[in-house]
Image (spheres, grey):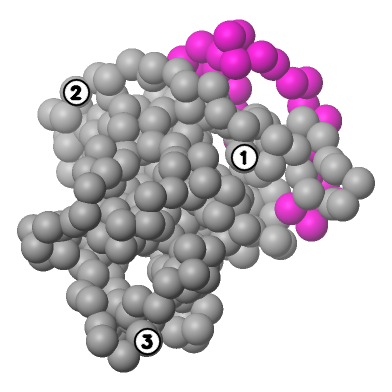
Amino acid sequence: MAAGLTDWQRPWPAPAKINLFLHVVGRRADGYHLLQTVFRFIDRCDALRFTPRDDGEILPARPLPGVDPASDLTVRAARLLRDTVGGRQGVTIELDKRIPMGGGLGGGSSDAATTLLALNRLWDCGLSSADLQRLGLSLGADVPVFVHGRSTFAEGIGERFTDVSPPPAWYLVTTPDAAVPTPEIFRAADLRRDTPAITAADWQPGFGGNDLEPVACRLYPEVARHLDWLRARGPAHMSGSGACCFAAFGDESQARTALAELPETMRGFVARGLDQNPAAALT
């Protein structure tokens, strides 16, 4: 069905994710690491708006600080989709950024996925979710899960999914003042790469840790400080390759109480766990 005017006017959400666990279970011959993880979305979202253009250009409304517009994942996603379907459409992409950049919360990947989902509808491309996931994988390993759109046990380099149902939870997410480059973590000689694999059916809430944490904490003591503070109050993990960390709570009031106790030298926010990517629900 062709998109109506309201689809062009609406803001399209791009949620953050957290990794409830993240294990490195091996490495491929091409150097890519084999992972197992559970992705869960949270209701901390960027928002994107799309405005059609008559000149065929695909441009950001405002360049992200420190990001070449040509390298912007939303621009790359839009161009990839257009080239795949052989279109000539133009669009201006306005991004309201609320997810911390470079924090392991998947903001850039989520923005790219929402761009694919939204423009597939707005341009009436007719591609399936599986088609969009394949396109997304060429943009980044985390993009397909946002297109897939559900809490899931992911394997391989993050592209094979088995859906799971984590219990309802609220999260205190802290944002250490550290920029952790993902390639640096995966290059580290002391990164564990042989954690025994499990099956998706074996996963239970509370299982596992994050194999990237020891390297990140060694290289970035601020990450270790945040984890130590959170773990004094219960189980906590780093998300992805960091730097953001999180702890789960049974209800919003408990999470907000913990947020109010954060030292002045720490920042964070409270977010609710989501079972579905709200952008996928709009398509």
Element type where label 2 sits in the image? loop
Indicate the position of residue 152 as horizontal and vertical percent values: 48, 27
Q: CA distance from mark 1 to mark 3?
A: 32 Å
Does 186 sit left or right of 264 as displayed? right
Nearest to the eye among marks 2 and 1: give it: 1
Task: Please name the amino acid that badge 1 sits on.
Answer: Gly
Q: Is 268 a magenta residue?
A: no
Q: CA distance from mark 3 to mark 2?
A: 46 Å
Nearest to the eye among marks 3 and 2: give it: 3
Check disc 2 and report the residue beneath it. 251
Indicate the position of residue 158 as horizontal and vertical percent values: 62, 40
Element type where label 1 sits in the image? loop
Q: CA distance from mark 2 to mark 1?
A: 30 Å
Q: Residue at x 43, y 49 (%)?
A: 127
Task: Please name the amino acid that badge 3 sits on.
Answer: Glu
Check disc 1 and report the residue beneath it. 158
Residue 172 visible, this orientation = no
The answer to which image quadrant residue 170 occupies is top left
**Magenta extent:** 186-210
The answer to which image quadrant residue 59 occupies is bottom left
Name the residue nearer the viewer: 195 or 2: 2
Nearest to the eye among marks 1 and 3: give it: 3
Task: Please name the amino acid that badge 2 sits on.
Answer: Asp
Q: Residue at x 21, y 67 (%)?
A: 49
Check disc 3 and report the residue beneath it. 57
